[in-house]
Image (cartoon, rainbow, N blue to C red):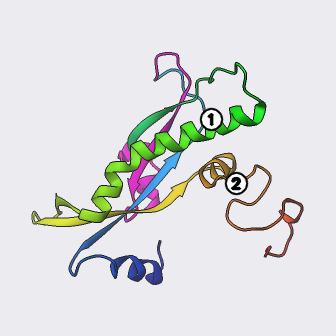
Amino acid sequence: MWTGKWWHAIQKNLPTGATLAPVIIASDKTHLTQFTGGKSAYPVYLTIGNLPKAIRRKPSSQACVLLAYLSVDKIGKAGLSQTQLKTRNYQLFHESMKVILEPLKKAEKEGILMTSGDGLVRRVYPVLAAYVADYPEQCLVTCSKYGTCPQCQCPAEALGQPTPGI
């Protein structure tokens, strides 16, 4: 996101004079029970990419907005194989994210009116720029098999090698 190539590639798809607001989504599958009435859940956060890391990563700055708590309650196992159960959990995650991000998809296409720091109202186009997650969640988000690389086609046995995979 912080390269000129990324900005230009995104900006050329927007109307002339449009304001781009890169959006970063983050989630952590750490089970939270103290905030969710005893039910297991994990949060999904949103932040704006043009905020410095030092501010984004500081909870007291309130630069991240909680979008949702995703349920991690167990799905009924009756009559399901282990593979079917995993597939159902993956589908639940992806359908939940689809619902959560639907307003962002609309705003990315149409833009939204926002008041800027100088008091002028501008049409801003929020664009999903990054999804921050640990390795297990990267596999879940990218539909990759655990133990393989979620970013490339590198075979599992080549992970951790000193030279990049193909």
Tag 2 secondary structure: loop
Residue 136 location (% of width, % of height): 69, 46
Which residue shows up at 64% across the image and 20% down it?
76
Residue neighbourhood size for the residue with mark 2, other residues' Cα within 10 Å, grouped as few (<14), some (14–19), many (≥20): some
Task: Report the residue that reaches farthest toward the top.
Answer: 38
Q: Residue at x 38, y 61 (%)?
A: 51
Q: Is residue 116 left or right of residue 72?
A: left
Give the image location of residue 87, x and y in percent. 67, 39
Sequence-wise first label, 2 or 1: 1
In percent of width and height, residue 30 lies at 60, 34
Q: Is residue 38 magenta?
A: yes
Q: Are marks 2 and 1 in contact (CB under 8 Å)?
A: no
- Judged left or right of residue 93, residue 45 is left
Magenta part of the chain: 36-64
Q: Which residue carries the number 2 mark? A: 144
Q: In the rendered image, is residue 4 in sight?
A: yes
Helix, strand or loop at mark 1: helix
Residue at 80% in and 73% down? 165
Q: Residue furthest front?
A: 79
**Amino acid tagged 1:** Asn
The residue depicted at 42 percent of the width and 81 percent of the height is: 9
- The residue lying toward the viewer, choosing from 118 and 31, is 31
In front here: 16 or 162? 16
> 59 left or right of 140?
left
Can see residue 63? Answer: no
Query: Of 45 and 144, which appears nearest the observer?
Result: 144
Left or right of 83 in this view: 73: left
Q: State which quarter of the image contains the C terminus.
A: bottom right
Q: Which residue is denoted by mark 1 in the rendering?
A: 89
Q: How many numbered badges does the structure rendering display? A: 2
Is residue 87 placed above or below 34 in the rendered structure?
below
